[in-house]
Amino acid sequence: MNVSERSSTISYAIRDVVEYARKLESKGDKILKLNIGDPLKFDFKTPEPMVDAIVNAARSSFNGYEDSLGNTELRRVIAERESKNNGKIYLEDVVVTSGVTEGVNLVFGATLEPGDEVLVPGPGYPTYTAYATFFGATPVSYKTIEKDGWNIDVQDLKSKINERTKCIVIINPNNPTGAVYPKKTLKEILDIAIEHDVFIISDEIYDRITFDDSFVSPASMTDEVPILTFNGISKIYLAPGWRVGYMAFYNWDTLFDIKEGIMKELRARISASSICQVGAIEAYKGSEKYVVEMVSKLKQRSEFAYKRLNEIPGISTTNPMGGLYIFPKIELDNKWKDDKEFVYEFLKMKKVLLVHGSGFCPIYGKDHFRSVFLPPIETMEDAFSRLEDFMKTKK
Ligand SMILES: Cc1ncc(COP(=O)(O)O)c(C=O)c1O
């Protein structure tokens, strides 16, 4: 029996590179992994009260299936959070998913037909490209401009929109570039969405991880454009393995059928984890001190990564304004064929795992790599010293 054509289209650079690292590990090599945005791989810990909430929930027999749309109390708390930060929204406008990743799958499943197009940021988080392709649609990358702090090239985005375009994906703060988009850029995109009658997906999973408080959600700026806001507890509340995320529907009255389609999909997959949703209630209702501590630690680390990487001949980088990642440019100088070979050779020679930039967009991400700035400064110093050494490789 053959594998379906659909599944053979899936690629996910962030985990694909791990296969090669595993081979080296099986031979006894110790690999320093800077490839994955999981804070728990470093010195970050899920807040204790959240862990206690889950343990207590399991002990009090909270172990049955949950409602398909999500725990009602959690949906209420999320609606309050969204209303406070972004724009008035009700419990009925919120559904809980097994992470943002499931949300992407559900929305594209309910909206895309073969031949449709989705505008995705280039570079951007590869799940959007992978799932759009999986459902037979074409992801089209719009340009973001490195010299302008990786801000969105609105003219480029506009030139790529056509009658087949279903939606525009915005990732803000962006993974992998660390860009946080100005209000002006978001306003221009909202105007384009109105003109061309498309909806917006706004992935805000890093909304609290910004270093200058400049984050604005497009949902706070319009009562006209249909927007699906994605968020969750993976990053901000340090619980990526719990797989709890949510979707908030803004201005969705004209897209009632799509919402219904998503609801059917939600029912068919039963529910997100019951006890992990109780942990998420604690996250959203509990003390903010954990977030504040984490962001302060990350700010220091991002500043170190920015400074240290720019000291390395052949490497240059913009300053990330949010998120967990830095996205430097490599002068390949004919020493390496492309960014992928660079990343694999660096791994082989210096035992540090990065992700090749073209994995985030073959056009606008090439000749770059992505590193997390999650590790303690000594660990990053070790990794970037190895990189400095590697850049001295002879032609
Ligand atoms: C922009 C973005 N969206 C979504 C996700 C995944 O979110 P979740 O863990 O909620 O599925 C990630 C993970 O790295 C991400 O960077």
Image: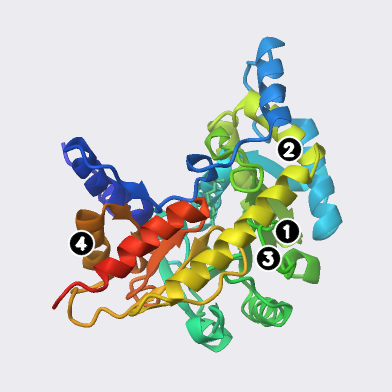
Instruction: Give the alpha-carbon distance from disc 4 to disc 2, as whole Å.
Output: 41 Å
- Circles 3 and 1, Cβ within 8 Å, touching? The answer is no
Looking at the image, is mark 3 or mark 1 earlier in the sequence? 3
Residue under the point 37% across and 57% down: 383
Q: Which residue is mark 2?
A: 283
Give the CA distance from mark 2 to mark 1.
27 Å
Q: Is residue 145 left or right of residue 293?
A: left
- N-term-proximal mark, 4 vs 3: 3
Q: Earlier in the sequence, mark 2 or mark 1?
A: 1
* Quarter of the image where the N terminus is located: top left
Q: Identity of the amino acid at label 3?
A: Phe
Report the residue marked by disc 3: 211
Secondary structure at badge 4 equals helix
Callout 1 environment at 10 Å: few (<14), some (14 to 19), or many (20+)? some
Disc nearer the start of the sequence (1/4): 1
Q: In the rendered view, tell whether residue 266 sits above or below residue 348.
A: above
**Label 1 sits on residue:** 252
Residue beneath label 4, please? Answer: 345
Between label 1 and label 4, give the one nearer the viewer: 4
Q: Position of residue 321 (x, y in %)?
A: 62, 69
Q: Position of residue 224 (x, y in %)?
A: 77, 70
